[in-house]
């Protein structure tokens, strides 16, 4: 029974048979597929812009928290287990 489970998932595609009958739905789906080329270009541009600002942000704020969240300028090598403070 489990071997034919993947065939049961193909039932989802059954409503697509109505595309042959309904011409307006066929036109909508064709328009959707034709617009994919433009959408891929937009998504590539968006990924480039996000990557650019991610790299810019990492470089701009690099080490900011390292310098801001310290009790002293020295490296913390040991912490007192009782108080949780630097030794």
Image: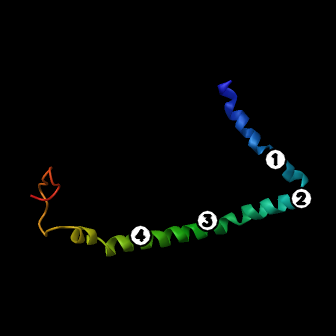
Of labels 3 and 1, the one closer to you: 1
Could you say which quadrant of the image residue 42 lies in? Answer: bottom right
Label 1: few (<14), some (14–19) or many (≥20) C-alpha neighbours in 10 Å = few
Q: Residue 48 carries which label?
A: none
**Left or right of 28 in this view: 57:** left
Of labels 3 and 4, the one closer to you: 4
Choose the circle earlier in sequence order: 3 or 2.
Answer: 2
The residue depicted at 73 percent of the width and 39 percent of the height is 10
> Residue 73 placed where, x, y %?
13, 70
Front position in the image: 5 or 30: 5
**Left or right of 41 in this view: 80:** left
Q: Cβ–Cβ below 8 Å for labels 2 and 4?
A: no
The residue labelled by disc 2 is 23
The residue depicted at 84 percent of the width and 58 percent of the height is 26
Q: What element carries label 3?
A: helix
The residue depicted at 55 percent of the width and 67 percent of the height is 44
Task: Count the labels in the image.
Answer: 4
Choose the circle earlier in sequence order: 3 or 1.
Answer: 1
Choose the circle earlier in sequence order: 3 or 4.
Answer: 3
Front position in the image: 39 or 86: 86
The residue labelled by disc 4 is 54
| Up/down of 27 relative to 53, above or below | above
Front position in the image: 19 or 65: 65
The residue depicted at 43 percent of the width and 73 percent of the height is 53
Q: Which mark is residue 40?
A: 3
Q: Residue 15 carries which label?
A: 1
Choose the circle earlier in sequence order: 1 or 4.
Answer: 1
Label 2: few (<14), some (14–19) or many (≥20) C-alpha neighbours in 10 Å = few
Of labels 2 and 4, the one closer to you: 4
Q: Is mark 4 on a helix, strand or loop?
A: helix
């Amino acid at each position: 029974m489990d071997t034919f489970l993947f065939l049961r998932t193909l039932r989802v595609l059954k409503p697509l048979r109505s595309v042959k009958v309904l011409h307006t739905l066929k036109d909508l789906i064709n328009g959707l597929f034709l617009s994919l080329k433009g959408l891929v270009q937009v998504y590539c541009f968006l990924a480039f812009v996000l990557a650019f600002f991610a790299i810019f942000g990492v470089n701009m704020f690099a080490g900011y928290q390292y310098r801001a969240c310290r009790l002293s300028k020295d490296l913390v090598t040991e912490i007192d287990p009782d108080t949780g403070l630097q030794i």
